[in-house]
Image (cartoon, rainbow, N blue to C red):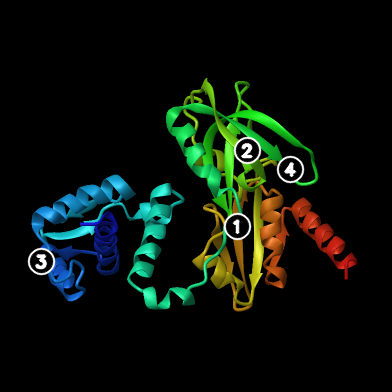
């Protein structure tokens, strides 16, 4: 069987258990036949067990069985809600599987474009897996090109652009946008990841990729109109929490480093948002809005 079809079966099993919360093997087998998952072939228990192992290896999703009811369920649903590569792979493969089975409507699906830099992903992944440094040619907007050797710590996708988190022997880190690279090659030098370093922890206090050491702050924003619903369904940051709700507005709090990335995201919400505190961040928003108004 083609690998693509097998992966579609993995995704089908995961989605069934997500929708129903738990299903016995018999219930799962009936739905398998009803949905023609394997062209009418019955789901064998041995195949299901192999699929369970593969799903855990590929997506980090653990399928467990409740001893009293014999229902299978996802034992670690939090994996499907975090920022892990497994969740991203699952989301991407789910879309791929749906589109593969819906050739007639492919032209009616509009996706976001990642502008450039994809040609370097393979080399960067090779360096990360092999523990090799990278030689990159880089050109910041409005600056001259330069070359640099970096230790590839991590990759991050943000607002349709890929970014490389690179380090050096002095323990300094910097973020490089792949669409501003003009050359990427493997170096002959190896490197070791800093002991205990976690890319997730590195970015945890920030929104986006701009990590300039901005101090931590307790940010409170007031959302108007339909904006509260957008923030509830797609939180801006893992620290977001709803602290006050009225008929006219909802207040959300964040414990975050309010960098230019976070400022820009709030401003993109227009008159649907108002920064209440801290005062210096509120002033910064006001100044940016004043500069914008001068252009009109």
| Residues tagged 2 and 3 counted as in contact (Cβ below 8 A) | no
Residue 81 is left or right of residue 148, and the answer is left
Residue 22 is left or right of residue 113, and the answer is left
Q: Which residue position holds label 3?
A: 42
Q: Which residue sits furthest right?
A: 294
Q: Earlier in the sequence, mark 1 or mark 4?
A: 4
SS at circle 4: loop
Circle nearer the viewer, 1 or 4: 4
Above or below, 164 relative to 63: above
The location of residue 221, given as percent across then percent down, is 66, 62
Residue 182 is left or right of residue 89, and the answer is right
The location of residue 98, given as percent across then percent down, is 35, 68
Q: What is the spatial separation of the Cα atoms under label 1 and label 4, in whole angstroms? A: 34 Å
Q: What is the spatial separation of the Cα atoms under label 4 and label 3, in whole angstroms? A: 56 Å
SS at circle 3: loop
Q: Which residue position holds label 1?
A: 253
The location of residue 257, given as percent across then percent down, is 65, 46
| Residues tagged 4 and 2 counted as in contact (Cβ below 8 A) | no
Q: Which residue position holds label 4?
A: 140
Going 73% across and 33% down the picture, which residue do you hit? 146
Q: What is the spatial separation of the Cα atoms under label 2 and label 3, in whole angstroms? A: 51 Å
Above or below, 194 relative to 225: above
Q: What is the spatial separation of the Cα atoms under label 1 and label 3, in whole angstroms? A: 51 Å
Q: Earlier in the sequence, mark 1 or mark 3?
A: 3
Circle nearer the viewer, 4 or 2: 2
- For disc 1, the neighbor class at 10 Å (few under 14, some 14 to 19, many from 20) is some
Q: Which residue position holds label 2?
A: 183
Going 79% across and 41% down the picture, which residue do you hit? 143
Q: Earlier in the sequence, mark 1 or mark 2?
A: 2
């Amino acid at each position: 069987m083609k690998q693509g079809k097998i992966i579609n079966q993995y995704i089908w099993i995961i989605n069934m258990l997500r929708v129903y919360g738990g299903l016995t093997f018999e219930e799962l087998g009936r739905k398998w036949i009803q949905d023609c998952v394997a062209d009418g072939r019955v789901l064998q228990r041995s195949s299901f067990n192999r699929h369970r192992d593969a799903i855990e290896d590929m997506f980090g999703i653990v399928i467990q069985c409740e001893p009293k009811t014999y229902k299978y369920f996802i034992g670690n649903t939090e994996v499907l809600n975090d920022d892990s590569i497994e969740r991203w792979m699952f989301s991407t493969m789910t879309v791929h599987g749906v589109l593969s089975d819906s050739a007639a409507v492919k032209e009616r699906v509009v996706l976001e474009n990642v502008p450039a830099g994809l040609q370097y992903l393979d080399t960067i992944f090779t360096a990360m897996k092999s523990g090799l440094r990278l030689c990159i040619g880089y050109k910041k907007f409005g600056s001259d090109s330069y070359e640099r050797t970096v230790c590839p710590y991590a990759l991050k996708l943000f607002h349709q652009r890929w970014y490389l988190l690179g380090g050096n022997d002095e323990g300094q880190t910097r973020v490089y946008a792949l669409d501003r690279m003009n050359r990427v090659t493997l170096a002959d030098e190896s490197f070791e990841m800093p002991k205990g370093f976690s890319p997730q922890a590195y970015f945890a206090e920030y929104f986006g990729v701009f990590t300039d050491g901005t101090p931590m702050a307790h940010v409170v924003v007031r959302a108007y109109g339909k904006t509260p619903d957008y923030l509830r369904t797609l939180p801006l940051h893992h620290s977001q929490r709803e602290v006050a709700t009225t008929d006219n507005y909802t207040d959300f709090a964040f414990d975050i480093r309010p960098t230019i990335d976070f400022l820009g995201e709030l401003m993109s919400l227009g008159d649907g948002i108002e920064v209440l505190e801290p005062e210096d961040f509120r002033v910064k928003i006001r100044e940016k809005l004043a500069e914008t108004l001068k252009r009109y």
